[in-house]
Image (cartoon, grey):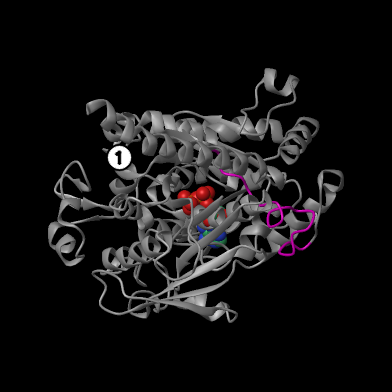
Amino acid sequence: MNILFASSEAHPLIKTGGLADVAGSLPHAIRNLRHDIRVVIPAYQSVLKQTEKFTLVAHLELEGVKQPVRILAGRLPGSAVTLYLVDSPEHFDRPGNPYTMKQGSEWPDNAERFTTFCRAIEALALDSAGLDWQPDIVHCNDWQTALVAPLLERHDSRPATVFTIHNLAYQGLYDWKVFKTLELPADFWGTKAMEFHNQFSFIKGGLVFADWITTVSPTYAREIQTSEYGCGLEGLISHRTDKLTGILNGVDYSVWDPARDPHIPVQYNARSLPHKLQNKQTLQEHFALPVDDTTPVFAVISRLVEQKGIDLVLDIVPELVKQQAQLVILGSGDAALEAAISDAVTAYPKHVAAHIGYDEALSHHIEAGADIFLMPSRFEPCGLNQIYSQRYGTVPIVRHTGGLADTVTDTTDETLEANTATGFSFNKATYTALNATVTRALGYYRQPAIWQQLVCTGMKQDFSWKRSAQRYLELYQTVLEQRAVKATARPLILQSLL
Ligand code: ADP
């Protein structure tokens, strides 16, 4: 199969969250299964700075886009996957974050930027960019690429479309005035298309028009059909339930494996766990916390947003202090949460330490050095750090939701007996529930034999891409067959009408 994988970010070139990890690793896994998958992302300034080996392969004049757009071609670093960059300097050649300005608010022209990106993907998908390559499947991800599905829907000889929801809370909503400036077909506005409560919703493009919808865990696929998690789109999603599949994200163990991780001071595996302790010491030193093997170190690595339940973590800080624990936080985002974290560091300098910012290498060191990883998310489409944590022998405490529910097995007498326990989970997003779970986890932490069992069971789990990549391929095949049936069914219906 020929597959075009469209994403607004891809590790290691540009990353703000889990989408980048997926876009940087799933295509590689699919290529290893011998399919021609190519990735397309915008040519952000920081991406162009890192990559010299790109060649100009096309100049495109796109409908509704003032300046011509260039397509550059190269390779996704560390793989043989072809990478296309959509080079539209007025939209992407600017410093900083792909979606937001320095002070955290959205780039004011985001709707125009990602419409341009989608128009370029449309041209690649229809082989009208002159590359002599047409995908059978276009796989779009999140709102930034969701418009590709309705844009392609207007063409008879289009590839099939798959749309993956990595996070339903980000929808790309803009008002009528903005919609008018995008020069999209007029019928894109309308409740059967992308209009949503009087706004233009990019994500609806994928939800309404893609041939198939996927999301990144089976539990999240069920949850988004309910009012609690559906963000107002639960009706539409339930309506498409027969074309909705949850496929758990895999992780790239060539990047996230303590046995060969270049970012951590001492590499280790399940047979050399004392080496993990050395990473704990260097982590405590790095954060100027008292160095002590027996002190339990809790960790958070996260975008600092309400979704992630960081407020709940801050609520339990006094309890962690009482229990003689340490807490290390790496994250950036919401200014109020950043300030609250700094306050906690000031109040408890011997127990709480933080790095406000984004630091890939430090995130690996924290995974290696911590004992317990906290992820009390209010919702979590898949979540990756609870999976990385297991491989690093850092026992996760998670809220039982979305991908967290699908990847962490709570510790009980039964799961310990069966040797399946990998962490701790709780249901209600409350201080009381998190606090009780932390206390429960610390009870086991103080029983070294049981703790070692938890650590080792976690380290043995296999969440590599192989199985999930295979599932995507099966899905692509189903979607292609379904489109072929549709194409042959039409003339038959006509015949019977005649
Ligand atoms: P989301 O996509 O909602 O942010 P995921 O758990 O799916 O959450 O993926 C988050 C990814 O981003 C992980 O690879 C995590 O290590 C990384 N990450 C988040 N915040 C930071 C940070 N401040 N520094 C380094 N890596 C981070």
> Of all residues shown, which one is farthest toward the top?
414
In this view of the protein, which residue sits in the foreground, 241 or 326?
241
Residue 411 pos. (x, y %): 65, 27
Element type at marker 1?
Answer: loop
Is residue 200 at all visible to an observer of this figure? Answer: yes
Is residue 348 at all visible to an observer of this figure? Answer: no
Q: Is residue 190 above or below residue 48?
A: above
In this view of the protein, which residue sits in the foreground, 411 or 180?
180
> Is 259 within the magenta?
yes
Taking the image as shown, residue 160 lies to the left or right of residue 178, namely: right
Question: Based on the displayed image, in which of its 4 quarters is residue 236 positioned?
Answer: top left
Taking the image as shown, residue 473 lies to the left or right of residue 371, namely: left
Taking the image as shown, residue 114 lies to the left or right of residue 497, namely: right
- The residue positioned 75% from the left and 53% from the top of the image is 258
Label 1 neighbourhood size at 10 Å, few (<14), some (14-19), many (20+)?
some
Question: Based on the displayed image, in which of its 4 quarters is residue 266 positioned?
Answer: bottom right
Q: Which residue is mark 1?
A: 231
- The residue positioned 17% from the left and 67% from the top of the image is 181
Residue 132 pos. (x, y %): 49, 67
Residue 372 pos. (x, y %): 64, 43
Q: Is residue 60 above or below residue 383?
A: below
- The residue positioned 60% from the left and 80% from the top of the image is 53
Overall secondary structure of the magenta section:
loop
Query: What is the span of residues highlighted in magenta in the rendered image?
Result: 247-265
Residue 487 pos. (x, y %): 37, 39
- The residue positioned 34% from the left and 71% from the top of the image is 101
Q: Is residue 107 above or below residue 26?
A: below
